[in-house]
Image (cartoon, grey):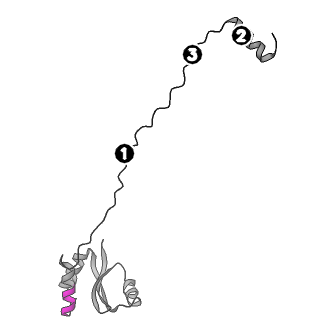
Amino acid sequence: MLYTFAGTSVLKGQLKVRFANSEARARQLAKLGDTDVNIVALPSASDKASAVRYLLDSGFAKTDAVKAALEAELSPVGKPNREVKIRVKVPRPAKAARKPAKAAAKPTQVEVTEAEVDRLYAAVYGQE
């Protein structure tokens, strides 16, 4: 990300290097409780490292504490590495195919004599 303003402020007794894209950030920091807010415009939009180098080269660091804070911002030891955790959703394997449905019963052929048909007809309809 590129910033157009950079500087320092003191929050709860700790000197912090600040980066912003508007002068309104200085007012916001003061409103949030920061003291000794000192933010200057950068000559061009810069990343954090370039902004800190500009502050060091331009004589912004008038005290040893400010100079140390700016140098700490440049050094990789200045900030602890963040541990990033990523969750990956692994698709589960497809369930085994269900048991195939039972095959429909095959119709069987039954041979019926005419006498049996007459007997069944009489039993159902009451005739002989």
Rendering quarter of residue 38:
bottom left
Q: Which residue is drawn at 27% across and 69% down?
A: 83
Please give the residue where the numbered disc 2 appears in the rendered image. Answer: 117
Looking at the image, the residue that sits furthest to the top is 114
The dot on residue 108 is: 3
Please give the residue where the numbered disc 1 appears in the rendered image. Answer: 93
Q: Which numbered disc, 1 or 3, marks the residue that appears first in the sequence?
A: 1
- Vertical order, 56 against 35 (above or below): above
Question: In the image, what residue type sits under mark 1?
Answer: Pro
- Tag 2 near tag 3, CB within 8 Å: no
Q: Distance between the residues labelled 1 and 3?
A: 42 Å
- Vertical order, 126 against 22 (above or below): above
Q: Quadrant of the N terminus?
A: bottom left
Query: 81 or 46: which is nearer to us?
Result: 81
* Residue 65 location (% of width, % of height): 20, 91
Viewed as shown, does residue 9 lie left or right of 52? right
* Residue 36 location (% of width, % of height): 31, 93
What is the chief secondary structure element of the magenta stretch?
A: helix
Q: Give the range drawn in magenta.
A: 63-69
Q: In which quarter of the image is the C terminus?
A: top right
Secondary structure of the residue carrying numbered label 1: loop
Question: In the image, what residue type sits under mark 2?
Answer: Val
Looking at the image, the residue that sits furthest to the right is 127
